[in-house]
Amino acid sequence: MVDSEGRGVQVKENIKFTPSLSEQRHKFVLDFVRKHKPQKVADLGCANCKLLWRLKYHESIEVLAGLDIDENILTRNMLHTGAGDYLDPRERPLTITLYHGSVVEKDPCLLGFDLITCIELIEHLEAKELSQFPEVIFGFFSPTTVIISTPNSEFNPLFSGKTLFRHPDHKFEWNRTQFQSWALDAARHYGYSVEFTGLGEPPPGAEAVGFCTQIGVFVKNIPNAVESLHNEKTIECTYTTVGTVIYPSLKEEKYLRKAVSNEVFSQILKLKRALLESLKMKKDRDSGDELEFVKLECDKSKNDPTEETPKPFCIGNVFYIPLERLFSFPKIKHLCGDLETLKMLIADEVRLSSDGSSVMINIVDEEDCDLSDNDWDDYSGEERNGGGSHGTCL
Ligand code: SAH
């Protein structure tokens, strides 16, 4: 039998969690973020910033902050943007800032957050710091939600080691009653509701000790009611900034322009290849009036989003790709939103027909083939955007 303190539990082997408990705690936060889609998230006691770096992949988040009292660990784990961040920019902006400071210091840079996480942090605080903690987190920072996790001491007898606490830097470890009464007090005092849960199931027969990690999820009763009480200018900054990373995003026109151009060029290249291929086939077979390019078009799947749009065509050695067709590619449509924006974004990168309806590509310079004896207009398909005639720009 096991009582609520875990007394009397026989430990036969070291308890191991798969995935690790640390991984499960981070996953708990990530699931919460996926569900509630906060924009501004701060992780206090962020240590090696592992949770922050995983949070950065969540599109809802635009501001991420990490705070730790250990400056070295922050410096060692400062992230930088990589080539991939520029090649495939985020939809929304993201700024990550790491701060060096104590969680019991008030600093305006953590005001106005949607979520503050304190994962395995509070048990590292001295008694005085712990007493200041609720006023700083709930009273001052006053985010919409707070997640606090801490060891459940009732689980400890299940571990084989003889140490008092799970980590040498822990100043205390609470049982469920201690954590819940502290959390309920704080919640009541600062206008939050709190729900308790946990991670790390006890082994069969020891269910009474509860989860290995206990978690309190706090939600502000009246969202955003407190921020206005704090005038940011009257409060001095106490944290030092270890580093800030600003990620490229499609909200910035230069990255949007690049992303659209890349996609447009990639589609143009495909269309051009198809055109040249069909030309080559036609030449090889010399099969009279067979319109191979049109045939290629017909070979496409029935769900082709470009199906209903004006087809590319040739006049002389110039290949015309109607913007309407480019716009029908889902990625380009998603990036630009409307045809005018597409035109505006690629105007400096491509040559447009005089009426601005098509991108013009001169093929003869780029391909090692003589097109002069080919009736390129034959490859235009039946529809002509702008109704151009032979030798005439659209
Ligand atoms: N949250 C991390 C690690 C927690 S370990 C994770 O999920 O893995 C606790 C961290 O809190 C340590 O990095 C420690 O340096 C930091 N810490 C301790 N006291 C602190 C304080 N007063 N203010 C800010 N960070 C503190």
Image (spheres, rainbow, N blue to C red):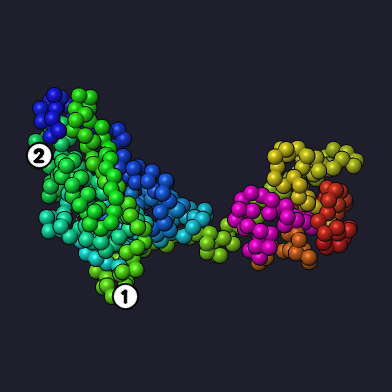
Q: Which residue is mark 1?
A: 233
Q: Earlier in the sequence, mark 1 or mark 2?
A: 2
Q: Quadrant of the image for the N terminus?
A: top left
Rendered position, 149 above or below 228: above
Rendered position, 48 above or below 9: below
Mark number, residue 312: none
| Circle 1: residue type | Lys
Secondary structure of the magenta portion, mostly?
helix
Dot 1 falls on a residue whose secondary structure is helix
Q: Position of residue 152 (x, y in %)?
A: 19, 40
Rendered position, 365 above or below 229: above
| Circle 2: residue type | Thr
- Quick check: 211 left or right of 276? left
Q: Position of residue 131 (x, y in %)?
A: 15, 57
Let me know if residue 380 appears in the view: yes
Badge 1: how crowded within 10 Å, few (<14), some, or many (20+)?
Answer: few
Write the start and end of the magenta stretch as one range: 316-345
Q: Which residue is mark 2?
A: 163
